[in-house]
Image (cartoon, grey):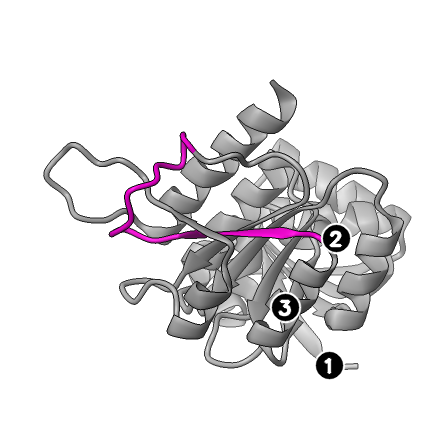
Amino acid sequence: MSEQRVYGFHAIEAILQHEPERILDVWVLNGRGDKRLDAISEILSKHGISQQKVKREKLDELADSNRHQGIVANCRMAPPRNENFLNQLLDTIDVPPFLLILDGVTDPHNLGACLRTADAAGVHAVIAPKDNAATLNATVRKVSSGAAETTPFIAVTNLARCLRNLKERGVWLIGAAGEVDTSVYQQDLTGSLAIVMGAEGKGLRRLTRETCDHLITIPMPGNVESLNVSVATGVCLYEALRQRTG
């Protein structure tokens, strides 16, 4: 199985909590003396995971980033989740499914932010196309603050087919589009639901748009014409959460 560098407190803590066996090696900043880093180091030692103290320049090189918070881990990549995993998930949950579908989001920062919000809102899974979209790389894991390890991310080979299968299972597809009249606050977002968000700048692809049961928009009485996809996702997910728990 291939390996991947993961960095940042939240991402590594999440792996330690759920799948510590995936962590192979860890590098920590020499002389940092941080309580949180010391706590992680203690847990790593209990699991018998080797740790090397290195200079900041080495961590920057290992993470290919300077936003590692003083810790980088080399991990076995988790097995990819696909349509089969999604079907098994839908067969086992005993509440109406609450899903997020990202139609070609390519920025890893946006994907990480969407995963973080999805986890916070209680989404059962995030679905995206396998090709021409961001994947679970180190940046996504860092930005998601651990949500990449707790919220299933399912990459599908054919998004249109996946959408049709969800509809056959009774899941309503609600797509976000800027030019429609129905507000997110007017739409019923209870029951079996998938919120479908488009890519940065492009929105929903034509086939995705046509497959949705309803299209909604986020009211914007100000001067800006659009929201960042992760911000728009948060608005839609939390309105759905409000309706589903109210």
> Residue 164's mark?
3
Residue drawn at x 81%, y 56% as measured from the top left:
89
Main secondary structure of the magenta stretch: loop
Look at the picture and state if 160 lies above or below 44.
Answer: below
Question: Nearer the N terminus, badge 2 or badge 3?
Answer: 2
Q: Residue tagged by mark 2?
A: 15
Indicate the secondary structure of the residue bearing disc 2. helix
Q: Distance between the residues labelled 2 and 3?
A: 33 Å
Question: Nearer the N terminus, badge 1 or badge 3?
Answer: 1
The image quadrant of residue 2 is: bottom right
Residue drawn at x 45%, y 63% as measured from the top left:
108
Q: Is residue 186 left or right of residue 68?
A: left
Magenta region includes residue 180: yes
Mark 2 near mark 3, Cβ–Cβ under 8 Å? Answer: no
Which stretch appears magenta? 170-186
Q: Nearer the viewer, mark 2 or mark 3?
A: 3
User: Within 10 Å of the Cα at label 2, are there few (<14), some (14-19), or many (20+) other Cα atoms?
Assistant: some
Indicate the secondary structure of the residue bearing disc 3. helix
Could you tell me residue 196's position as x and y percent?
49, 55
Mark 2 belongs to which amino acid?
Ile
Q: Residue tagged by mark 1?
A: 2
User: Within 10 Å of the Cα at label 1, are there few (<14), some (14-19), or many (20+) other Cα atoms?
Assistant: few
Q: How far apart are marks 1 and 2 (CA)?
A: 16 Å
User: Within 10 Å of the Cα at label 3, are there few (<14), some (14-19), or many (20+) other Cα atoms?
Assistant: some
Mark 3 belongs to which amino acid?
Arg
Q: In this view, does 105 lie to the left or right of 17?
A: left
Total labels drawn: 3
